[in-house]
Every structure is written in C-alpha cells, then in structure tokens.
Image (tube, coloured by chain):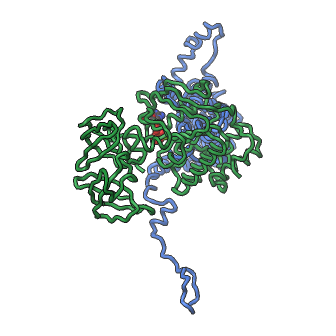
Amino acid sequence: MTLTAEPGTPATTAPPRPPQPLRHRLAERGVDWTLLLILPAVLIIGALFVYPFLYGLSISFQPLEGGDPLANYTDFFGDPYLRDSIWKTLRLAVPVAVLSVAAAAPLAFRMRRDFPGRRIVTLVVLLPLTFGSVLIAQGMTQVFSPTGWTNLLLTSLGVPQQQFIYNYTGTFIATTLVSIPFAFVMLMGFFGGIDRSIEDAAATLGASRAARFWRIIMPLAVPGLITAFTLCLVEAFAVFPSAILVGQPDNATHVLTLPIYQAASQRSDYPAAAAIAVVMTVLELVILGVLMLLRNRLYRGPATGGKG
Amino acid sequence: MSVAEQTTGAGTQGSTFGSLQMRQVSRWYGKTAALTDLDLELAHGEFVALLGPSGCGKSTALACLAGLQPLTTGSIWRDGKRIDSLPADKRGFGMVFQSYALFPHLTVARNVEFGLSMRKVPRAERRRRAQAALDLVQLADHAGKLPSQLSGGQQQRVAIARALAIDPEIVLMDEPLSNLDAALRIEMRTEIKRLYQERELSVLYVTHDQEEALSLATRLVVLRGGRLEQSGTPEQVYTQPASAYVAGFMGYRNMISARVEQVESDPRRVCVVAGDLWLQGTADPAAGLRAGSEVMVAIRPEDIVPGRAGVNDVPALAEVVEYHGRELAVRARTERGVVLHFRTEKPVAAGARVTLGAPEERVLVFPAEGRAEVPDDAHG
Ligand SMILES: Nc1ncnc2c1ncn2[C@@H]1O[C@H](COP(=O)(O)OP(=O)(O)OP(=O)(O)O)[C@@H](O)[C@H]1O
Ligand SMILES: [Mg+2]
C-alpha cells in the first residue's frame, strides 16, 4: 500500500482490512431477511409431505407378516399383474403429456397477441381445470355412452358406434382434458416471457416465419416445453378417479395408483401400499431427473433482448 | 478492417434503391392514434433524422416502414412499387431497435451473424463479416458472450453491428446511441456517418438528441403527436423552426410567453412585451400576428449577447453560472422576473449585473400554443 515507506522499515504487505459487517457478508451469500419468504411453503411441505413420505418409506420395509424387509418389493415385482401397472401408467402418462404439450404450445404461443374472441378461448380451455377429473369422468359417461351425442353423431355420419369409455381411451381422454389446460397455463407464462421485438428483429434480418420459429422461438421455449411436459407427466402419473370411472381398472388402466389404493384401503396393508408408492416415487424422480438434466443443458437465461 | 471493405453485400437485392415513401399513413392502437396521415420520404443517399418527444410515434413510424406493424390507413412505396404487404423479412432493411432486441440465447457473434446466415452466406465469410462489424463497434473481445453478460451500452452496440452486418441499403435506427457515454457516443456517431458516406447508405435515424440530429442528418423531420410538424435541412430547421414546438427541440432554451405590442409595417417585424422585457423580433407573416396576440418568443442561449448596447437590451442579474469549459452557461433574471439563459466566453460571476441583448432576426416570435407540449429534456 505505502509506496513511500520510510527508509529502514521493510515494505510490508497491506495491513489487514477490518472485516466487513456480518450483515454484508451474509447478504453476499444471499442470506437476508427475505429468506423468511420461503418459510411458509417449506414448513407446510415439510410437515405434510416429507415427514409422511419418510414414514411411508420406513414402513414399506416392515411387512405385516414380518420377515424379509424387502418382502413388499419382491411381492410387487414378482407379480406380473402388479409389475405391469408400471408399464400401464407410463403408457397412459407419456402420451397424455406429449399430446397436452403439443396441443397447448401452439395455443399458448398464439395467445400472446390479441385476437377477437381471445378471452372466450382462454375461458373454454381453462374450464376443464376447474371441473376436475371426477366431474369430467361423470360427464363422459353421458357424452360417450352408446346413446350419447358423440355416438349419435358418428352413426349419423355412417361410422359404426365406438366404445370410448370403460377402456384405455376413456382414461386417456379424461386425463388429457385436465392436462391440456394445465400445460396451457404453464406455457402461457413461458411464451409470454419471450420478447416480441426479438421476433421482429429476426424478421428484419431476413428470417422467414419458419426460421423465426425454429431459430428463435423454439430455443427459447424448449426449457418451458420440457418443464410443462414434466409436470403434465407427473400429474398424469397420479391418475386415479378417471382410471376407475371411465377406464378399465382391472386391466388396461390398472395404473400404479390402483394397487396402492387396494392395498391401503381394501386390505389395510399399509406397508405394501407404501412400497408401491415408493416405487412410483422413485420412477417419477428418475424421469424428473433425466428431464431436468436435459433442460439444464439448454439455454435458460432471460428471454428478452435488451432493455424494456 | 471495416465492414465496408466487404465484397458484394447479400442485402443488396435491388441495388437500384431510389426512394422509400410513406404516404398518408395512420396507425391506430385501439382508439388512440400513434400516427396520423404521415408522409415521410427517404431518398437514396439521404440521412433523415426523425425527431420528436417521447410518444410522438417515432418508433411506430419505423415499425410501419419495416413491415412490423400493420397500417391502419395509407401505403408504403419503394421506387414506385407499393410494398406495404411485403413481409418484414423480404424488405432487407437494417434495423436497430430501441429495445436492442438481441437474441438472448445466441452469443454476440451469432447475433451479428444471424442476418448473414439467413442469407445463406458461407460460414467463413459470415465469420469474417461479423468480426468486422464487431470491430466497428469495438466489441471484438466480447464475441463469445451472451447478451445478458454485456452492459446496456455494449448491447446497444451489438444491435448496431447486427443491423449493419447484412450490408443493408436502407438502415432504420431507433435511438441507437441513447445508452452510450458521451465519448463513445461521439465516436459511434462518427463511425455511423463514415459508414453512411462510404457505403452510400440511406438512413432513417430516430433521436432525441438535437446535436446528434444536426451533425448526422441531411434532413430533419420533426413529429408532433403522430403528425409531421416540420421537415427541412438541418439549417432550415435550426434557424427557422416552424413553430415554438420545433424551436423547443432545436435548442431554443429561452421560451418566453409574451404579448404582441405592435406589428411594424414590415409584417416580419414585431415588437413584443413580456414583463419588463421589450423585444424586437421576427415572425412569419403567415402567422397573422396582430397587436395583443399571445405569443411565444424563442431565443437560443448563444444568440443572447451580454454587454451589448444595441437592440433588445435589458438589464439582468446573473443567478447561476455553469462552467462549460470554453464558455459559461448563465441563467439570469430581469428585474421583473423573466428568466434568460445565455452563453458567454467572458467571465461572469453569479450575482453580477449584466446587460443582455439579442439581434432581432434571432428573436423568433410564434403564435402561443400549449407550452406543455414542449418537452423540458429537449433543451440543448
Ligand atoms: N403496443 C401498443 N399499444 C398501444 N399503444 C401503443 C403501443 N405502442 C405504442 N403505443 C402508443 O403509440 C404512441 C407512439 O408510440 P411510439 O413508441 O411510436 O413513440 P416514440 O415516439 O417512439 O417514443 P419514445 O421516444 O419514447 O420511444 C404512444 O402514445 C404510445 O402510447
Ligand atoms: Mg420509440
């Protein structure tokens, strides 16, 4: 520090600075009073989810009959009928999530700009979300019954009567109906965040509509699409009412939630139910992890191109 | 190496550019008009500066020309061909957006290359031209960064480089230097002017900065509430603003409400009074001023001469003295409270008594109008 050190005194290193106030040092690491904002959610989830989950995990290793702690798991994976419910869940959840995102993405993209009837469209799309799957399944039993309007319409067009309910299709339709608005709400946020002037700039640089879509919109939207897909998938994983009400619960729509329910509520075998739930959770976590990993490899910064 | 050295520009489709015209264009947002019956022309080789206060429709005019906004009425013509339904990506204009509008997921280099890759320019040449454009705006060192890793002024320069990299014939710039520091702004201004001359660009340039407009433009266009207020050479607009509104933009810092005392036999000569200030001024005879008319008197600080015995002399008290290097900017007040701004190279101390005068041809008299429309920040 001191260039004009007195002759004789050896030039020393700079004197130690007094430490910054604690408050500053903490704030640099992001520790300040606003951390309190995370408390409500953390407390609720901790108390109502993490604790029960860990409890479930522990009892899943304590079979009712005692003995081998892994008995519940070997039972599940040993029984082809039970084991198959993993596959049946995936066969339902993945197409539902794909279709939901595929249908909701163009909609959300166009909803950024106004057009006549925009509010009505929004309302109609969001409506299924407010109904919930039970109400929708109930309605479907009417609409898709042999004498419901879909089949009347089909027969009047010369198409033979179709079986829409009490099978895979019924559950698929019911789940998708709730999933699309769910994806739509999420994607609205993602697409809304893409600055429109960026597209304008691309246009002035000679990018055609397609080029703008593939080179600008998509790269910025993909993280959002993956997030929406992931959440739709997780949501569809937990399908339950529509699998029973408009599905074929003992066969095509014997999804993971059903054996859980049967074990817990019909056989009062909580450890077995917990074991299947753990299997389901691990499966979801794996899928979630893979998708998030994928997402993290993509551009995730702001979707605006400057000021304003 | 400069961008101008480049071989054939890919953006030169129809290198016969003669003129770009906006005819009677209106643009309504719901019930409010952003542009009303606007006629605007950019001829080959012109550098037109578009001036006006915030919200007067400058960006809207640019967006309409570039094909980014639909026209409510009117048409756009290029060399006698109507182009208003031609999509923006077919117009080939270089555009610098007020909000920069950089592609956030692409590096600076990729941003600048974007227009070239849309034109299928081979990769090596694309690199080279992007590099040249970045050199031009002094950002070569930042080529690998994302826009969000740059400062506002750096982002703005990327936007300029990106628009110029495609070698456009017509360039639309929306306040391209607004976020730069004073030194860089002047440097970039010179670069833009050099490019304009070397490449024979035709430029439409939005700015709030009177000095920028005067130093760059071959023609000034002043907008007011979406309408054309005045169009002319920088000298015309500077020395003969068409209205008090334009004067406010052209550095006429002294805008004094006054009343006409007398119109001379020469109808250009009027005598006005504001408080204890009696002034001989110049008015447009077409304004039809008569004794008793409410008027606005506009005088540039440079045109007020201290210590001069002649016409329009008035005693005043120097209140605030600002040191501007070569000269002083002084705010003075007459005995009855009329505030006058002037500049002088002679030393003046705050509190000193001065006599101020101004040649009558530099005292411009306009019919009074809503003063509120003259923005305060427009004063040089
Ligand atoms: N998307 C929009 N919706 C509604 N009104 C708009 C929209 N864009 C602009 N306007 C209005 O149009 C008018 C002109 O806006 P414009 O952006 O062209 O102004 P400007 O002259 O560029 O201003 P500034 O100097 O602040 O950039 C303003 O009154 C503004 O409120
Ligand atoms: Mg603007």
Q: Tell me what residue is drawn at x 66 percent, y 45 percent.
A: B198
Instruction: Name the foreground residue: B345 vs B101.
Output: B345
According to the colouring, which chain is blue?
A
- Determine whether, in the image, residue B156 is placed left or right of residue A43: right
Residue A268 seen: no
Give the answer, above or below, for where A132 lies relative to B202. above
- Chain B: drawing colour: green
Q: Tell me what residue is drawn at x 56 percent, y 55 percent.
A: B184
Instruction: Name the foreground residue: B176 vs A70.
Output: B176
Q: Tell me what residue is drawn at x 62 percent, y 50 percent.
A: B146
Residue B155 lies, in percent from the top left, at: 58, 50
Residue B133 lies, in percent from the top left, at: 67, 48
Give the answer, above or below, for where B21 lies relative to B45. above
Instruction: Name the foreground residue: A206 vs A95.
Output: A206
Residue B356 lies, in percent from the top left, at: 31, 56
Give the answer, above or below, for where A255 lies relative to B342. above
Q: Which residue occupies the extreme bottom position in the image?
A: A8
Residue A128 lies, in percent from the top left, at: 51, 27
Q: Quadrant of residue B138?
A: bottom right
Number of numbered tags placed on the structure image? 0
- Determine whether, in the image, residue B6 is placed left or right of residue B221: right
Instruction: Name the foreground residue: B190 vs B225.
Output: B190
Residue A144 seen: yes
Give the answer, above or below, for where B351 lies relative to A152. below
